[in-house]
Amino acid sequence: MVMRRKEAKDYGTKKLIEGVFKQGDRCLIVEDVVTSGSSILETVKDLNREGIKCRDAIVLLNREQGGEKHLERHGIKMHAILTLTELIKYLFEEKCVDQEMVDKVKNYITENQVNEAVLEKPVIISRVKMPFTERLKLAKNSVASKLFDIMSSKQTTLCLAIDLTNSTAILNMAEEVGPHICALKTHIDIMEDFHSNFIPPLKDIAERHNFLLIEDRKFADIGKTVELQYSKGLYQISSWASLVTAHSIMGKGVIDGLKLAPGLTERGVFLLAEASSAGNLMAESYSKETVKLATEHSDVVAGIVCQNPLFLDQPGLLQLTPGVKIETAGDGLGQQYNSPEQVVLERGADVVVVGRGITEAKEPATAAELYKKILWKAYSRRVAK
């Protein structure tokens, strides 16, 4: 016997299908009640993914609302122990129900047939197969639309993580690699010589080279505190960073704080659903709730920071994936790297974050151009019809 879980657990075997089986095994599905047959077809789909073949299903009660025909159209023969008509007939014969109830049930069956046009859901093209020029029209956040447009026009998905501590070094690096990137990600609070005079030339470089500024602040507090952290204090992030990152652990309040703060009219948020560091505590359930929060507030949320394609049916959102390097060895401090091709083709990345692979290179501009070409080639392969 095998069992299909409603969702895979993030502990134990972590499998959706539990039990003893091997590729090519045949499986008989046992179900209690069938109305449309959709739950059986979902089970068949998951079993087929594991290499288990299905052709038949035994059910206790066929409600006679179209499920048998629906299953047959998809190659599944249904064997019912009882139909609803037979059941109500037996109950009437045993004087458990009266004629009025028999008539009600018959009318219910007639009037509540499953609409197969509704059951056959339209094919949804996965966001990873859609070009950016199509997805920008579906983005509800204006900064996300702008980023899609920049990536398309510059033919780059490269975001540079510029984790340098000196203002002159940051500006020089931004100027040098600017032609090859779609976004520049900062950690403004690690700068040793920050001054408000640093911001205007940084914004000027971004405008001239057509890339966006992302402040990787990772906000995680109550809404009012986040509002102040975002707009006040030494850095006044809301006045210059088009995009920021935030944790979803504090819920909707974080998004509200970022939305209501004074600053740039157009702004976007990347919510963290997964991390590239070894041993992080972001469980599968947390990631799912983060995606849900992002889709519910996509007017503010531009995308999701993750390592896997968690939201294939949301083409208006961007996947930002950090931890990318051509040489994929870790740094000894928990950082784990994936190759550029892997994150685009296998993990669904739209915006790819590269840091030390460029900032520590002998010729950062050359390295940035190399990453840009590799990433764009992988993206082009991904969306090829």
Image: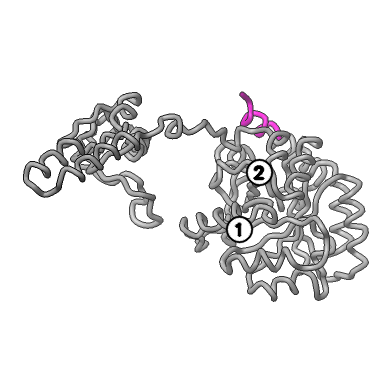
Res 50 visible? no
Q: Is residue 29 above or below residue 166?
A: above
- Please name whichever residue, 41 or 147, is drawn nearer the observer in this view of the structure: 41
Image coordinates of residue 126 in percent, x first then y, are 56, 36
- At a point 59% along the width and 36% down the height, the residue shown is 345
Taking the image as shown, residue 115 lies to the left or right of residue 225, namely left
Image coordinates of residue 92 in percent, x first then y, are 11, 43
Q: CA distance from mark 1 to mark 2?
A: 17 Å
Taking the image as shown, residue 295 lies to the left or right of residue 139, namely left
Q: Residues within 10 Å of mark 2 (few under 14, many from 20)?
A: many
Q: Which residue is mark 2?
A: 316
Q: Quadrant of residue 213?
A: bottom right
- Please name whichever residue, 136 or 122, is drawn nearer the observer in this view of the structure: 122
Res 213 visible? yes
Asked which secondary structure carries label 2, the reply is: loop
Asked which secondary structure carries label 1, the reply is: strand
Image coordinates of residue 260 in percent, x first then y, are 74, 67
Q: Quadrant of residue 44?
A: top left
Q: Which residue is mark 1?
A: 272
Q: Amino acid at mark 1?
A: Leu
Does 14 lie within the magenta span?
A: no
- At a point 52% along the width and 56% down the height, the residue shown is 287
Taking the image as shown, residue 185 lies to the left or right of residue 125, namely right
Q: Amino acid at mark 2?
A: Gly
- Please name whichever residue, 189 or 103, is drawn nearer the observer in this view of the structure: 103
Q: Which residues are magenta?
A: 376-385
- At a point 70% along the width and 48% down the height, the residue shown is 140
Which corner quadrant holds the N terminus?
A: top left
